[in-house]
Amino acid sequence: MARVDTSLVTHLPLFAGVKPDELEEILREARSGRYPKNSAIFEQGADAQSFFLLLHGHVRAAKTTPTGEQIVVRYVAPGETFGLAMAIGLAHYPATATAVDDSVVLIWPTAAWPRLAERFPSLAANTLQTVGARLQESHTRILEMSTQQVEQRVAHALLRLAKQSGKKLDQGIEIDFPISRQDIAQMTGTTLHTVSRILSGWESQGLVESGRQRIILREPHRIVVLAERSADSGAA
Amino acid sequence: MARVDTSLVTHLPLFAGVKPDELEEILREARSGRYPKNSAIFEQGADAQSFFLLLHGHVRAAKTTPTGEQIVVRYVAPGETFGLAMAIGLAHYPATATAVDDSVVLIWPTAAWPRLAERFPSLAANTLQTVGARLQESHTRILEMSTQQVEQRVAHALLRLAKQSGKKLDQGIEIDFPISRQDIAQMTGTTLHTVSRILSGWESQGLVESGRQRIILREPHRIVVLAERSADSGAA
DNA sequence: GTTCCGTTTTGCGCTATCGCAAACACCGGG
DNA sequence: CCCGGTGTTTGCGATAGCGCAAAACGGAAC
């Protein structure tokens, strides 16, 4: 079994308040895994046999309706956990996880969770906090979908992605993994067509530069302004 | 201090796995409070000084945008907790809680949480599960807002309310607290006008019976059918 | 270099839903 | 019993964004 170096993960919020030897003990129960770009990590509805910590790469969590429509629940960045189904009392994964880039993860068997959570209260507390944070994000998203127009929602979504997984460039910020118009549409509750039109518009104003599964925010500040513009503020 | 009878709360999922004497100890830290109909329990943005367990009545949690628009985050039914801001790492309440009916709650000081959570792992685990369940619900709501038309969303919302807080009648189910068209609009991301039109339509088909802040589902089964109808299935 | 496939762009008509405005109904209070 | 106020109904444009379709584009594989 590939032993994991604790130094790689000590500083993650997940392990805040966990002592080094305790961390050692926690990591001993994990194995690591690699998933190539575009491979599935787990499928919605499958038995939740494991939970994961992303070390490297990017993972998309998406939920599918009975009729086949999809939404992107979130993108997972390195250092974040995913697939916590059982910690929150689910026997099956509520979404599908796909590596959008070559990714490396730590994998714990679901069965290990109750023991770990009881033995290391900080771990439980930290997990509660991250789940709580995700709940807040979801509420924010619901608020946006209820009150904002598509253009504002797309602006917010891109700004969040840039914050979470942006690579600073000489001028602007590039979203550091492949993401299509369709993906953005599924994050904001619209269609890829509308997203394409919006991005084309922004591109012609020099706000962004984008291409095939690639987006660079050239003028983040002006996009912030756009994001905050209320529905009726006209364009003069 | 009004002592709370443990028998009232032992069976709540929140306290699953907590021994009677432990429960006693937990309750010792709580006080009880009463909130008359339409009174505020806490305001969005205020210091999160307490967290709550609803014993009786109904509470609405709503989130407000900077521009004053509101959405209803959820309705709290008896037996559920709310105002868990600090458990999930927030210093301020992310939403406003209002009693929609005369309500009775247990109130713990925020400061008690870390101790309780560490001392009673089941309490922490149960809380994680309920927060996780709310996260799932939020994702479901996002999915609905992204993929369904307003009528379907309203149908789903009413069915959920009926399930959570419905009073069975001889024929049909009544939602057991005052709820306006506006409230439903804020749960489904639409306007009170559209909700009113939809309910009027349903009423003329005998699906519901409704009035001022009052809704009775007369034909829940047919509403389920409506809720599941995909966008394009015509009315023939 | 050429082919093939997934992604992106763009045009155009359509419609579900909003937004505004006005009239109503119901309930509690005096 | 009447009054005032909140909640509800309904009509009528206006429109943001969808849905369909087709074409252009870009990359990767061979």
Image (spheres, coloured by chain):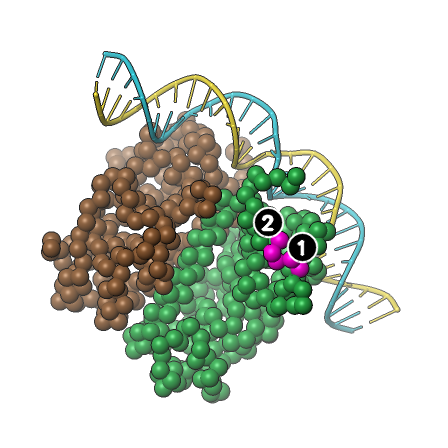
Chain colours: A green, B brown, C yellow, D cyan
Residue A54 tag number: none
Closer to the camera in the image, B24 or A69? B24
Q: Amino acid at mark 2?
A: Leu
Q: Secondary structure at mark 2?
A: helix
- Can residue A107 be seen from the camera position used here? no
Q: Position of residue C1 (x, y in %)?
A: 88, 69
Closer to the camera in the image, B66 or B2? B66
Q: Which residues are magenta?
A: A218-222
The rendered magenta stretch, by its main secondary structure, is classed as helix
Residue A207 tag number: 1
**Residue A162 position by quadrant:** bottom right
Q: Amino acid at mark 1?
A: Leu
Q: Position of residue A23 (x, y in %)?
A: 38, 82
Closer to the camera in the image, B94 or A144? B94
User: Eyeballing the image, is B129 above or below B73?
Assistant: below
User: Eyeballing the image, is B18 above or below B226?
Assistant: below
Q: Secondary structure at mark 1?
A: loop
- Tag 1: Cα neighbours inside 10 Å, few (<14), some, or many (≥20)? many
**Chain holding disc 2:** A
Is A14 a magenta residue?
no
The C terminus of chain A: image quadrant:
top right
Residue at point 47% right, 43% down?
Answer: B67
Q: Position of residue A100 (x, y in %)?
A: 59, 68
Q: Which residue is mark 2?
A: A226
